[in-house]
Amino acid sequence: MAIAHAAMTAEGDNRVLTQKVVKDMIKNIASKKSVLPKTDLNLQQLGSMPDVTQIEQLYDLLKFLESQHFVELSQALEESKTAKKAFFTAFFLEQQVRVQKLSELYAERHAFESTLKAIQKLVNAENKRILNVILRIYAIDIIRRELGFLMIHGAVSAQASAGLEETYNKLIKDLSAVAP
């Protein structure tokens, strides 16, 4: 109990900051101060790929997840507005699961991007290889968690889905071979 307060926001809810992130996203995108991440491949191209476990495809899938969740949340908020519901009711109560998911995906994509940029700056080839394996494991784990959503939207095919576990396990095995 001694650190209970330190693990929470001043408001007593450890999810308040995620709500703030999403409110800022909505405001900044609406005012054109920022834009949603754009995939290099379109949805049809992504959905027809037999393998989505390489860095480029994983990055596209993370961008798609964030963008699609933003669009769906925006549509739900617009429907609530049309139904004359207060923003507070819609955002903080009715759409809270979507808000939390979007904030989580936003943070995960940013973590992926930052790590990718750091890897690109490395000189040592073995360090690059190992960190690329770790980054792929991280992203595949997210894709595995979001697989139902991705398949429903046509971003991951059944064939690509089938290869996720095998690749994930192989990467874990590869990483364990270099662990001390």
Image (cartoon, rainbow, N blue to C red):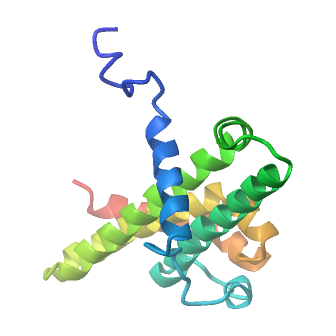
Residue at point 53%, 74% (across, down): 36
In the figure, is residue 100 to the left or right of 34?
right
Q: Position of residue 50 (x, y in %)?
A: 68, 85
**Does 98 sit left or right of 59 as displayed?**
right
Visible in this render: residue 176?
yes
Q: Is residue 168 left or right of residue 162?
A: left
- The residue lying toward the viewer, choosing from 80 and 50, is 80
Residue at 35 percent of width and 25 percent of height:
7
Task: Give the x, y percent position of residue 114.
Answer: 31, 68
Residue 141 visible from this viewpoint: no
Question: 147 or 180: which is nearer to us?
Answer: 147
* Above-or-below relation of 103 to 14: below
Quarter residue 117 falls in: bottom left
Residue 92 percent coordinates (x, y): 64, 37
Q: Is residue 109 above or below residue 47?
A: above
Q: Nearer the viewer, residue 120 or 64?
A: 64
Q: Residue at x 56, y 68 (%)?
A: 30
| Front position in the image: 8 or 30 | 30
Q: Residue 45 sits in which quadrant?
A: bottom right
Q: Residue furthest front?
A: 84
- Residue lying at 38% horizontally and 28% vertically, measured from the top left: 9
